Amino acid sequence: MMPDSPNKNDPLGELVAALQRLPGIGARSAQRLAFHILKTPRDQADALCAAILSVKDRVTYCSICSNITSVDPCNYCISPERDDRVLCVVEQPENVAAVEKTRGFRGRYHVLMGAIAPLQGIGPDELKIKGLLARVAQGGIEEVIVATNPNVEGEATALYLARLLKPLGVRVTRIAMGIPVGSDLEYADEVTMSRAMDGRREV
Ligand SMILES: [Zn+2]
């Protein structure tokens, strides 16, 4: 028997096992959180459960840009204040927040839901690339800023997209590498991210 396998007659052990499945939570943190929840008043525990279920039930993906949203299309896609001529392509919904932090970008977004990673079996067909091409083919977009992560997969994805997008008559730019190579946009502070956007170059 596995030492930490959850047991239906062991609610605390089950909670520890469930928490341990969360990213960045090791065995000790899981145990600490579980004991904290155990001591938490009932209404706070209810609120936590309700928040988790609400995210699962009410948050969905935008049918245009694939960003996470509770209204479809999302606010970034329908806002009349944003510039239709510039489209920023990111890997994950959380990367939209990183670009938004800069407050300098007022265009629209497209989330790929990953990057090309052949070793992990992720090819172009697994990503939201068809939708991106369709949006660009519709016309009106003048520049596509590829803000994929500055690592091997992100670079490969950027080159792949540039090859497909340029024949459609748009300018394709890549964010500058002020962000440490091999890192993730998620951890870029707003100054670094602003510089990366301002220093973008044509690919
Ligand atoms: Zn959207």
Image (cartoon, grey):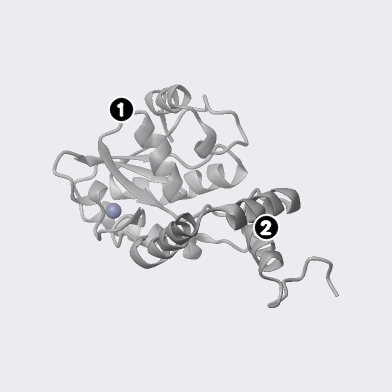
Residue 188 seen in the figure: yes
163 or 155, which is in the foreground? 155
The residue labelled by disc 1 is: 104
Tell me which residue sits at (57%, 61%) in the image: 122
Please name the amino acid that badge 1 sits on: Gly
Q: Would residue 97 be found to the left or right of residue 26 on screen?
A: left
Cα–Cα gap, marks 2 and 1:
38 Å
Q: Would residue 109 be found to the left or right of residue 176 on screen?
A: left
23 or 98, which is in the foreground? 23
Relative image position of residue 177 (x, y in whole percent): 52, 28
Q: Secondary structure beneath disc 1? A: loop
Q: Which of the 4 image quarters holds residue 16?
A: bottom right
Q: Would residue 183 be found to the left or right of residue 83 on screen?
A: right
Tell me which residue sits at (51%, 39%) in the image: 186
| Mark 1 burial class by Cα count in 10 Å: few <14, some 14-19, many 20+ | few
The residue labelled by disc 2 is: 20
Please name the amino acid that badge 2 sits on: Gln
Relative image position of residue 145 (x, y in whole percent): 37, 38
Disc number for residue 61: none
Of labels 2 and 1, the one closer to you? 2
| Mark 1 within 8 Å of ligand 1, using the beta carbon | no
